[in-house]
Amino acid sequence: MAIKNIYITCMSLIFIACSCGKTTQNANTMADSYQKVSPDFNADSAYAYLDRQVAFGYRVPNTKEHVACGDYLVAEMKRFGAQVQEQKMVVTAYDGTKLNARNIIASYGLDKKNRVLLFAHWDTRPYSDQDPDPANLKKPLLGANDGASGVGVLMEVARVLQSKTPEVGVDIIFFDAEDYGIPAFAEKSLIKGETWCLGSQYWANNPHVPNYKAKFGILLDMVGAEGATFYREAISKEYAEDILEKVWRTAGLLSYGKFFIGKDVGGVTDDHVPVNQIRKIPSIDIVDYRLDQDTELGFFHSWHTQKDDMRNISKETLKAVGQTVLEVVYKEK
């Protein structure tokens, strides 16, 4: 997860602690009478897709595991009936390393002008720079939650899209090289500009379709852990508050209010930033914050550590996120 440059200042932390912000309807007051329009999201399938990614090992660019997992994702999305494009690129990491990366784009309803963009990153971090054991800091991590969870949810979304066509076109992008940003132990970057989200930066400047546009975008990052809580992230609110409201309201109607919390938090550097700022597509980030936990940056305890593995993953969380995303897509005209 690219939290990396978190935009929470001391004052905003005070604001978070003292204010509920603008609360969306995320309780279950309307859930009893609400009739969903989307097909069922199968959390067992999403879990299996997630587990399969983790089984490849560390999906770090320039490794055979990364190549193998990428090939698997391409094959599966084709199996789910999508038109798939591979956007291959060479990007430069913070330390000057040239990374062989590829974004994977899967499209549905190519004849439809109105489109929705769904995205997640599929690479994993080469460092466990938040691990409490100093011996682990330079070890890669499995990224079950930070990486595989968002992709696993979107793979199940893709399977559903194949079975029932929504009224809008849908583009699903798995961005690469998101998590190769400068580690906590490094003194400085050897490159200019943002060291995180390299794949989404590349795509935002070089979209798979010239002048590509979508009505809005939804990023899934760390969406599989047990006890996950999703707050209203600041950059999402700045660029796409109406989409934020729509998604959180939908989650409440589906009785997932305990996951989607109607409180504002600070912003993070994540793949939605270049999509918003460069591609100008209003996009939100569904990302797991843990404001009640004593972690350095407010994330689940296994974030960027050796413990980010399948033991953290909850089918209940996958279901809440996946069903909410499907409902938003199938309600769109």
Image (tube, helix red, strand yellow):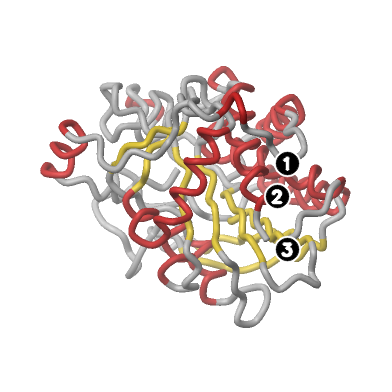
Say if 128 sits above or below 216 in the image: above
- Residue 169 is tagged as 3
Q: Nearer the viewer, residue 309 or 114?
A: 114
Is tag 1's residue or tag 2's residue first in the polypeptide sequence? 1
Picture quarter with the C terminus: bottom right
Picture quarter with the N terminus: top left
Residue drawn at (55%, 40%), measured in percent from left and top? Answer: 250
Q: What element carries label 1?
A: loop
* Quadrant of the image occupied by residue 96: bottom left
Q: Residue furthest bottom?
A: 210
For mark 3, does the 10 Å Cα neighbourhood hold few (<14), some (14 to 19), or many (20 or more) residues? many
Task: Identify the amino acid type marked 3.
Answer: Gly
For mark 2, does the 10 Å Cα neighbourhood hold few (<14), some (14 to 19), or many (20 or more) residues? some
Task: Identify the amino acid type marked 2.
Answer: Tyr
Q: Mark 2 points at which residue?
A: 330
Q: Nearer the viewer, residue 32 or 283?
A: 32
Q: Residue furthest top?
A: 311
Task: Identify the amino acid type marked 1.
Answer: Ser
| Left/right of residue 215 with respect to residue 70 in the rendered view | left
Residue drawn at (74%, 39%), measured in percent from left and top? Answer: 156
Q: Compute the Cα span from label 3 to label 1.
A: 15 Å
- Tag 2 and tag 3, C-beta contact below 8 Å: no
- Tag 1 and tag 2, C-beta contact below 8 Å: yes
Task: Name the spot of residue 76 as percent of width and height, x first.
Answer: 82, 46
Residue drawn at (65%, 36%), measured in percent from left and top? Answer: 323
Residue 304 visible in this rendered orientation of the protein: no
Q: Name the residue under label 1.
A: 38
Is tag 2's residue or tag 3's residue first in the polypeptide sequence? 3
Is tag 3's residue or tag 1's residue first in the polypeptide sequence? 1
